[in-house]
Amino acid sequence: MIRKTAVIIGASSDIGQKTALLFAENGYNLALTYNNTKFEVKPKKDVKIKYYKLNLTEKGKVEEFFREVENDFESLDVLVFASGVAQKRALIIDCKDEEIDNLFEVNIKAAIKCVKSFCKRTINVRNASIVLLGSFAEKIGCSCESVYAATKSAMSGLCKSLASELGNLGVRINVVAPGFIDTKMNNNLTQEEKDEIADMTPLQRLGTTEDVAEAVYFLASDKASFITGQTLFVDGGLVLE
């Protein structure tokens, strides 16, 4: 039996590494990307893992990466786009054009390119699944991080459209939108600020990387075979509809 393969873009992040480990522990081979930070996933199961340096802002590199992965693995079954850059907190009038361009380039344009390259290799071949990492900011906004919120909001629009477009071609796509997760990205917050955020959250705590990884794995797995085009908020109830 051919072992399934998960391609995880931005696997060197805290959430990316935990997600990679979860897929590996469930028997998936892994194609993992990083940009600057080298890392290693050490699952208990004996699975094939390959690491690829990928700069999402370099023209043509995404398709080149997928060609390489296609040659390295027998199948491509899951794409997780966990890459992203945060915005320096600032009023919109103070946002530099270069930062705006970079936020859109990495957070949404690169996601589109990865989805495109993945789907070229999976539609009409086998059941495939895509999970994009969004943010709770798409629902409630984020003062002084408006450009970041805009890029994450675009993920849900992309997801809904592609769910309709790709459903009859055997590809599912969903978004996991984390709330405040206790990762290095939030190390700029003081403990007092983290406690205040926890107090605002109905479950009275920050999220963990495991919380997010489990949601990603579920949506990618066959247990979610009738779920597509959805955004799942993993936020402890911070966004209630």
Image (tube, rainbow, N blue to C red):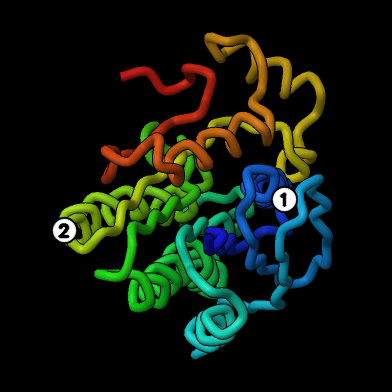
Residue marked by disc 2: 168
The residue under the point 54% across, 31% down is 179
Which quarter of the picture shows residue 8? Answer: bottom right
The residue under the point 64% across, 62% down is 30
Name the residue nearer the viewer: 225 or 161: 225
**Circle 2 sits in a helix, a strand or a loop, which is it?**
helix
Give amino acid for label 1. Gln
Above or below — where is 224 with respect to 8? Answer: above
Give the foreground label among 1 and 2.
Answer: 2
Residue marked by disc 1: 17
- Return the mark for residue 193: none
Q: Residue 98: horizontal and vertical position, in percent?
A: 55, 75
Which quarter of the picture shows residue 210? Answer: top right
Above or below — where is 211 with respect to 145? Answer: above
Q: Residue 241: horizontal and vertical position, in percent?
A: 30, 19
The residue under the point 58% across, 64% down is 9
